[in-house]
Amino acid sequence: MNTLFAQKPSCKFIGLVQGLTFTALFLVLASCGVSTITIEGSFPSPSVQAEPLKVAVYYDDALRDFSYIEYSEAGAEEFDIRSGNSAIELFNALLPGMFAEVVVIDSLEDADSFGVDVIFEPLIEEFQLALPEKTKLNVYEVWMRFNMRLTEPDGGFIADWMVTSYGKTPVETFRSSESAINEAAVIAFRDLASSFALSFRRVPGVRDWLETQDRN
Amino acid sequence: MLKVLRIVSGLSVALISSCTSTTLDEFRQGETGLATDESIVILGRRQSSDYETRTEFVECVGERMGNEGISVISEQPFIDALFPWFEPRSAPMRPADLGRILEQPSVAEKVGNFGVRYIVWIDGQTEMVDSAGTISCTLSPGGAGCFGGGIRDFQAQYEASVWDVANLTSVGNIAADATGTTYIAAVVVPFILPARVEPISCDRLASQLAGFIMGE
């Protein structure tokens, strides 16, 4: 009498189990590598009163190529976050709404040839990321700190100040960590733009310089 | 047998759904009414550090109010058009702050173009407040299955504040509080009867807001 336990497993069944095992192993190994996130978002133009200035903006390579590495608790690289292009897109959307005319220059020496009133150079100083599995909160958080520098075309100093920004997004079922980090970073960029646009005239060096411009 | 199972399932769903209880409190401070060429915009409050009002809930309320014949402007297009004045950092916290924002000519023009008469601020969240029970699942070459049971208690608390843009005053608040229990049972296959706390809160709040806006 043949019983279930006396029958040998078929070749097909063995092949299926092997296939599933290899697939599961592959997925586990794939998840162990670093995940690269290039921040992408859309940034609106601001509804503010534009300053009657022609501004040259210079994006240093340090900004263009900025990358932040998040490490796991075991010390392995977990996320590689590249935000340079997004920062440039943000300022390219923001500055034309704040100033009468904006030109992007490839080097600080080019500014004179454009006949600009002022040179603006943003630099990212710090980027921080907080993951829910580490903080035990149900949010992904991003902090950024930018150094904003304003100089005259001949190199004369006008102002140099820091702007910090913050963005968070809640944990959601069926949303990947990469998507959540991107969203938190985009919110932080919008916060940066909001803070910069609304406080520009109140920066002491900028305020004093604008007053001299108004008198002239 | 199948027929009996269907009847039992249907009754269970009806019974469980009725286990969600909702409380609404309305406080009126001024007269309201909406002309045919006027609209409202519903915005979520996102200033808190430990939670934020979900976009999906705000959209739900807007959609339900739209079904009752009220012209509702979508949240994100409004925020983008009036950037950076309604970001979490810069959003007005009182009607007087809105007045200062509207002193910006470009902002007043855009709000006028939208035809916004009322801004509705929604603040709150849905969260799990208690849980009990355990479910364990196993996977083996012989088969897979889950066994166990549990309950999850949810609470939704939202408050809607209505601002009259024309008069720059607060005309009232509506608070919605809902609680419900999700039941989970697993005999090989998990079976979940969810507490529809958030959708029910959305429906009740939207219905109450619609009546409030129309001056009922």
Image (cartoon, helix red, strand yellow):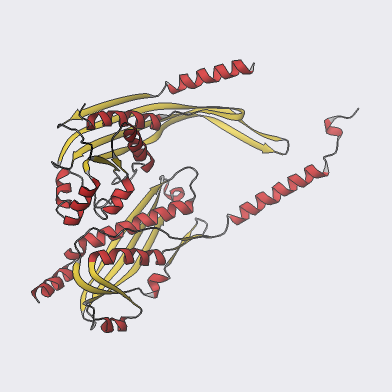
At 61% from the left and 35% from the top, the residue drawn is B137
At 29% from the left and 63% from the top, the residue drawn is A94
The percent position of residue B213, horizontal first and vertical second, equals: 23, 32
Marker count (numbered): 0
Q: Quadrant of the C terminus of chain A?
A: bottom left
Position of B78 relative to A206 (above/below): above
Quarter of the image for residue B130 reads: top left
In this orientation, which residue lies closer to the viewer: B131 or B192?
A: B192
A5 vs A201, left or right, is right
Taking the view exactly as shown, the residue that stands out farthest to the left is: A215
At 35% from the left and 30% from the top, the residue drawn is B203
B131 vs B62, left or right, is right
Taking the view exactly as shown, the residue that stands out farthest to the front is: B36
Position of B211 relative to A66 (above/below): above
The percent position of residue A207, horizontal first and vertical second, equals: 15, 68
The percent position of residue B47, horizontal first and vertical second, equals: 28, 46
Quarter of the image for residue B35 reads: top left
Q: Can you see residue B22?
A: yes
A206 vs A26, left or right, is left
The percent position of residue B101, horizontal first and vertical second, equals: 17, 52
Q: Can you see residue B119?
A: no
Position of B47 relative to B27 (above/below): below
Quarter of the image for residue B199 reads: top left
Q: Quadrant of the N terminus of chain A?
A: top right
